[in-house]
Image (tube, rainbow, N blue to C red):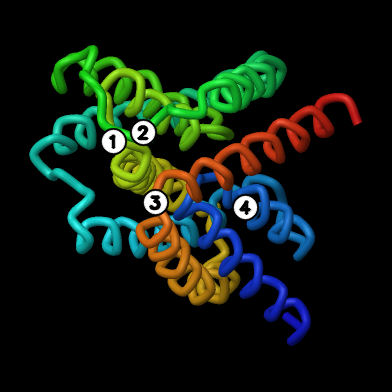
């Protein structure tokens, strides 16, 4: 790799990790960078999972240290998410995900509109609509499988589920989301490693950026709270919608 490519990949890892720690969607930056570097699509996906794991791990560590992660609350969801994500990654090797490519942008757009029209969403904790066991089975099963099978918008779906079904405040919902995102990323990564779809040298360059970006992003989110997360959240969702629609119709 040239020094220019190394610098670009490092910057992509750093900025992707920063955005991902706050609102998800870091793959909007990191995956195109990997494709630009010349990796085949499947190798780019596997390498992206490898580098994303480390940035998410740093974000989880930061949120946990600040007291925003309740491990007794999240552990069952982690277990179900891990199994479901591995199942999703395996199923995607057997069937097409073309239908999801068509419907997911519109689902994300609906979430962005809902958040825009609900300025009080996630500002304070609310009454939970589901007990943690039911939430773990429903959200962990569905969203874990979805992340392994397809992926775009997973963090957005998790955050909304945590706010609307568990009644979490937005900062705690983001912390919960990072833990389960880390889980599904690791589960998917196992499949990619098994099928030799990871470029380790490129991943190492991006991991260096991810570790810095994940720490900085989580620190900003913790420092500025729900209003800051909400702005980044909406911006990332709209950017993701635009990219997915461009890939579909552009």
Residue 22 position (above or below residue 103): below
- Tell me the number on the disc at residue 43: 4
**Residue 164 figure quarter:** top left
Left or right: 178 with respect to 229?
A: left
Q: Quadrant of the C terminus?
A: top right
> Label 1, on which residue?
82
Total numbered badges shown on the rendered structure:
4
Q: Earlier in the sequence, mark 4 or mark 2?
A: 4
> Label 2, on which residue?
86
Q: Residue furthest right?
A: 250
Q: Which x, y percent locates residue 101?
A: 68, 22
**Residue 116 figure quarter:** top right
SS at mark 3 in the image: helix
Q: Which x, y percent locates residue 82?
A: 28, 35
Mark 4 touches mark 2? (CB < 8 Å): no
SS at mark 1 in the image: helix
SS at mark 2 in the image: helix
The CA distance from mark 2 to mark 1 is 6 Å
The CA distance from mark 1 to mark 4 is 22 Å
Q: Earlier in the sequence, mark 3 or mark 2?
A: 2
Q: Earlier in the sequence, mark 4 or mark 3?
A: 4
> Label 3, on which residue?
225
């Amino acid at each position: 790799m040239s020094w220019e490519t190394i610098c670009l990949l490092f910057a992509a890892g750093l900025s992707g990790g920063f955005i991902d720690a706050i609102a998800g969607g870091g793959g909007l930056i990191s995956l195109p960078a990997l494709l630009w570097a010349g990796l085949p699509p499947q190798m780019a996906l596997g390498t992206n999972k490898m580098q994303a794991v480390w940035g998410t791990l740093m974000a989880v560590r930061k949120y946990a240290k600040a007291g925003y992660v309740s491990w007794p609350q999240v552990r069952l969801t982690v277990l179900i998410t891990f199994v479901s994500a591995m199942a999703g990654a395996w199923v995607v090797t057997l069937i097409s995900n073309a239908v999801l490519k068509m419907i997911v942008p519109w689902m994300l757009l609906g979430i962005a509109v809902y958040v825009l029209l609900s300025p009080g969403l996630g500002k304070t904790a609310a009454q939970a609509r589901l007990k943690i066991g039911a939430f773990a089975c429903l959200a962990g099963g569905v969203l874990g499988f979805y992340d392994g099978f397809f992926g775009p918008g997973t963090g957005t779906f998790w955050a909304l589920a945590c706010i609307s079904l568990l009644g979490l405040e937005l900062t705690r919902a983001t912390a919960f989301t990072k833990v389960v995102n880390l889980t599904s990323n690791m589960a998917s990564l196992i499949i990619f490693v098994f099928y030799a779809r990871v470029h380790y040298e490129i991943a190492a360059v991006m991991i260096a950026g991810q570790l810095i970006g994940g720490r900085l992003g989580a620190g900003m989110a913790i420092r500025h709270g729900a209003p800051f997360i909400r702005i980044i959240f909406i911006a990332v969702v709209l950017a993701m919608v635009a990219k997915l629609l461009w890939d579909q119709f552009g």
